[in-house]
Protein backbone atom coordinates (compact mmCIF):
# COMPACT_ATOMS: atom_id res chain seq x y z
CA UNK A 1 0.00 0.00 0.00
CA UNK A 2 1.50 3.29 -1.09
CA UNK A 3 0.04 6.34 0.55
CA UNK A 4 0.22 9.76 -1.01
CA UNK A 5 1.92 12.54 0.95
CA UNK A 6 -1.54 14.01 1.59
CA UNK A 7 -2.79 10.70 3.01
CA UNK A 8 0.26 10.38 5.22
CA UNK A 9 -0.32 13.88 6.55
CA UNK A 10 -4.03 13.18 7.12
CA UNK A 11 -3.57 9.83 8.87
CA UNK A 12 -0.25 10.20 10.71
CA UNK A 13 0.71 8.55 12.98
CA UNK A 14 -2.05 5.94 12.58
CA UNK A 15 -0.83 4.89 9.14
CA UNK A 16 2.16 3.24 10.83
CA UNK A 17 0.04 0.74 12.79
CA UNK A 18 -0.68 -2.71 11.33
CA UNK A 19 -4.41 -2.28 12.00
CA UNK A 20 -4.49 0.59 9.51
CA UNK A 21 -3.41 -1.68 6.66
CA UNK A 22 -5.57 -4.58 7.83
CA UNK A 23 -8.71 -2.40 7.82
CA UNK A 24 -7.68 -0.73 4.55
CA UNK A 25 -7.33 -4.11 2.83
CA UNK A 26 -10.52 -5.44 4.42
CA UNK A 27 -12.52 -2.48 3.11
CA UNK A 28 -11.18 -2.99 -0.41
CA UNK A 29 -12.49 -6.57 -0.51
CA UNK A 30 -15.85 -5.71 1.03
CA UNK A 31 -15.14 -6.84 4.55
CA UNK A 32 -15.13 -5.04 7.84
CA UNK A 33 -12.38 -5.02 10.41
CA UNK A 34 -12.81 -3.28 13.71
CA UNK A 35 -10.51 -3.15 16.62
CA UNK A 36 -11.30 -2.01 20.10
CA UNK A 37 -12.53 1.58 19.59
CA UNK A 38 -10.91 2.52 22.89
CA UNK A 39 -7.45 1.52 21.69
CA UNK A 40 -4.90 3.07 19.37
CA UNK A 41 -5.17 -0.01 17.12
CA UNK A 42 -8.92 0.46 16.85
CA UNK A 43 -8.47 4.10 15.94
CA UNK A 44 -5.86 3.12 13.34
CA UNK A 45 -8.31 0.58 11.89
CA UNK A 46 -11.02 3.23 11.65
CA UNK A 47 -8.69 5.55 9.77
CA UNK A 48 -7.48 2.78 7.48
CA UNK A 49 -11.04 2.00 6.43
CA UNK A 50 -11.69 5.72 5.95
CA UNK A 51 -8.62 6.02 3.72
CA UNK A 52 -9.81 3.13 1.55
CA UNK A 53 -13.30 4.64 1.37
CA UNK A 54 -11.93 8.03 0.32
CA UNK A 55 -9.83 6.41 -2.40
CA UNK A 56 -12.85 4.47 -3.63
CA UNK A 57 -15.00 7.60 -3.72
CA UNK A 58 -12.30 9.50 -5.62
CA UNK A 59 -12.06 6.68 -8.14
CA UNK A 60 -15.85 6.70 -8.64
CA UNK A 61 -15.90 10.48 -9.13
CA UNK A 62 -13.11 10.26 -11.71
CA UNK A 63 -14.87 7.44 -13.57
CA UNK A 64 -18.04 9.54 -13.75
CA UNK A 65 -16.36 12.37 -15.62
Image: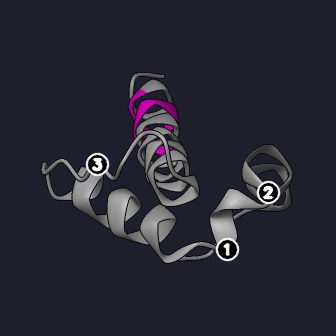
The secondary element bearing badge 3 is classed as loop
Residue 4 appears left or right of 45? right
- In this rendering, the label closer to the viewer, 2 or 3: 3
Viewer-proximal residue, 23 or 6?
23
Range of magenta residues: 55-60
- Residue bearing the label numbered 3: 34
Image x and y of residue 53, in percent: 41, 38
As displayed, is residue 21 above or below residue 26?
A: below
Circles 2 and 3, Cβ within 8 Å, touching? The answer is: no
Separation of marks 2 and 1 at Cα, in angstroms: 7 Å
Kindly identify which numbered label has been placed on residue 12: 2
- Residue bearing the label numbered 1: 16
Viewer-proximal residue, 36 or 51?
36
Separation of marks 2 and 3 at Cα, in angstroms: 19 Å
Image x and y of residue 13, in percent: 78, 61
Circles 2 and 1, Cβ within 8 Å, touching? The answer is: yes
Majority SS type along the magenta span? helix
Determine if the magenta segment contains residue 22. no
Residue 11 appears left or right of 40? right
The structure residue drawn at horizontal position 49% and vertical position 53%, both measured from the top left corner, is 48
The secondary element bearing badge 1 is classed as helix
Image x and y of residue 8, in percent: 79, 59
As displayed, is residue 25 above or below residue 45?
A: below
The structure residue drawn at horizontal position 51% and vertical position 51%, both measured from the top left corner, is 39
Determine if the magenta segment contains residue 56. yes
The structure residue drawn at horizontal position 62% and vertical position 75%, both measured from the top left corner, is 2
Q: Quadrant of residue 15?
A: bottom right
Label 1, residues with CA under 10 Å away: few <14, some 14-19, many ≥20: few
As displayed, is residue 27 above or below residue 21?
A: above
As displayed, is residue 1 above or below residue 53?
A: below
Viewer-proximal residue, 41 or 52?
41
Amino acid sequence: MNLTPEEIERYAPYHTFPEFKIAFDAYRVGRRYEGDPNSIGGQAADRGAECAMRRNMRKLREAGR
